[in-house]
Image (tube, grey):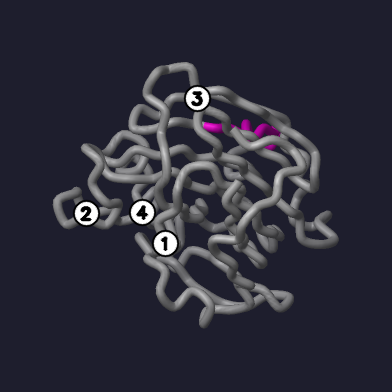
Amino acid sequence: MATAGMETKVLYQNALAGPGDVAGWVAEGPLSLGRHAGALELAGALDDAEFGDQAHWTFWCPVEFPDGVRISWEFLPVEEPGLAMLFFAARGHRGLDLFSPALAPRTGYYPQYHTGDIDALHVSYFRHKYESERAFRTCNLRKSAGFELVAQGADPLPPAEDALDFYRLEVVKDGPRVAFSINGLPLFDWQDRSGKVLGGGYLGFRQMAPLRAAYRNLVVEKL
């Protein structure tokens, strides 16, 4: 397991300065791309009041990463309500590639991701979609398939109207360990003792409509 202070190697780096930087990414669901404050803006393309859970989406980076990585990116909420999350260590069941045609098609509908035929970890943050989430704000780590809530921490992100600048988010996935922080503030540090530890895989952003948010400076480093 990597320890603090060890040198890292950059595996992937993307400024996310606009739609051109994600030309090879894979969108599942009704995603709209734009620019905001020199960064990539992501939003839903459908009205969630009309389309409900079919209005949400997932956006995959097309690069498969090994285990033992640090994933960091900058996030700015632009207009809420909504929710944001990061999938990582994502692969198909039975070791299949995430984009294997042998897997069921995915359209952005959430159950396809948490109880479908893929395995993944995902951390949800900026959980401002529902009144109950806004009243007691947490960051949640879930392990799927199975939708198991395995770790939770307080969410320091403010409402969009109070966000003055981008926030730096960081996930460390190193064997059984998953740690999450925002602007250097540790929010949880979990060890998977299930005996079924997920390894490497793909990462992807997800939002619940009608959230509009900006992203920039995605970096994946090998620990």
Badge 1 crowding class, 10 Å Cα cut-off, few under 14, some 14 to 19, many 20 or more, is: few
Q: Earlier in the sequence, mark 2 or mark 1?
A: 1
Q: Quadrant of residue 57?
A: bottom left
Please name the amino acid that badge 2 sits on.
Pro
As drawn, is 89 to the left or to the right of 210? left
Q: Earlier in the sequence, mark 3 or mark 1?
A: 1
Start-end of magenta stretch: 132-141
Q: Earlier in the sequence, mark 4 or mark 3?
A: 4
Residue 97: image tag: none
Queried whether the magenta region covers residue 133, the answer comes back as: yes
Q: CA distance from mark 2 to mark 1?
A: 19 Å
Please name the amino acid that badge 4 sits on.
Gly
As drawn, is 119 to the left or to the right of 37? left
Q: Nearer the viewer, mark 2 or mark 1?
A: 1
Residue 149: image tag: 3
Determine which residue is flagged by label 2. Answer: 105
Element at badge 3?
strand
